[in-house]
Amino acid sequence: MRSFAGALIIAVLLPLSGASQVGPATSGASSPEAFAGLFDENCPAGKDTDLTTVWQRFGVDGGLFNQWLCGVGIMPLDLDGGITGVEMYTDNGPYRLVLFKAKDGVGSFFGLVDLGFQKYHEPGVEVIKAASRQWLVFDGMGSSGTGVSSRQMTWFEVRETGVQRVLD
């Protein structure tokens, strides 16, 4: 995982029109370890893991992530509030970060970060904090064509109520 520690990034953060917010689910406590453990049995056998019921329990659309073959890892994040993520990524595929929040020793689903198609490598991520606010900033692939590609910085604000895309 690449980071751009030490970089000074200044931006005015305004909500994007149509930006979706995903907050904590009301049912189905889970943890990063339990979520990542769903793949333990199927990965060595080279079988997809069906996550349809997991996404339903979290109250989110599984989309491209309903069937998933390995490609997960727990990502420690320097976020306040006991928030940890599980990355779902494969080369030449979509990217999703599933966030969990621990409270009183119990973990629960907190939100999602979806970046779509990441062709050549997983995106870099950095945690930015200012005063009492915090953001996850992803440096990922924007678009590509024959012999060219672009990078895109995407900012997600992390709040008590969940995570929201605020700047592309």
Image (spheres, rainbow, N blue to C red):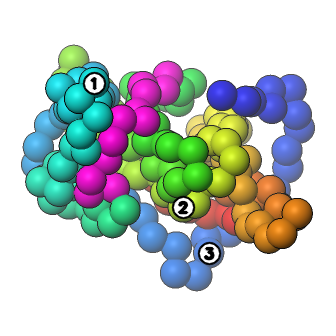
In the rendering, at what x and y percent does residue 38 appear? Answer: 20, 32
Q: Measure how far apart labels 3 and 2 are at the Cα level.
A: 17 Å
Name the disc covering residue 44, or none. Answer: 1
**Residue beneath the point at 28% across and 24% down:** 44
Name the disc covering residue 116, or none. Answer: 2
Q: Earlier in the sequence, mark 3 or mark 2?
A: 3
Q: Quadrant of residue 132?
A: top right
**Apparent side of residue 64 relative to residue 20 in the rendered image (left or right):** left
Question: Among all residues in the image, which is located at the extreme top?
Answer: 105
Q: Which residues are magenta?
A: 65-76
**Apparent side of residue 73 relative to residue 101 in the rendered image (left or right):** right
Helix, strand or loop status at disc 1: loop
- Mark 2 Cα within 10 Å, few/some/many (few <14, many 20+)? some
Helix, strand or loop status at disc 2: strand
Helix, strand or loop status at disc 3: loop
- Mark 3 Cα within 10 Å, few/some/many (few <14, many 20+)? few
Three-letter residue code for mark 1 = Pro
Camera-nearest residue between 68 and 61: 68
**Residue beneath the point at 42% across and 64% down:** 21
**Residue beneath the point at 41% across and 52% down:** 112
Tell me the mark number nearer the camera, choosing from 3 and 1: 1
How many badges with numbers are in the image?
A: 3
Which residue, given by chain and number where applicable, does mark 3 sit on? Answer: 16
Q: Measure how far apart labels 1 and 2 are at the Cα level.
A: 26 Å
Q: Earlier in the sequence, mark 1 or mark 2?
A: 1
Q: Are marks 3 and 1 in contact (CB under 8 Å)?
A: no
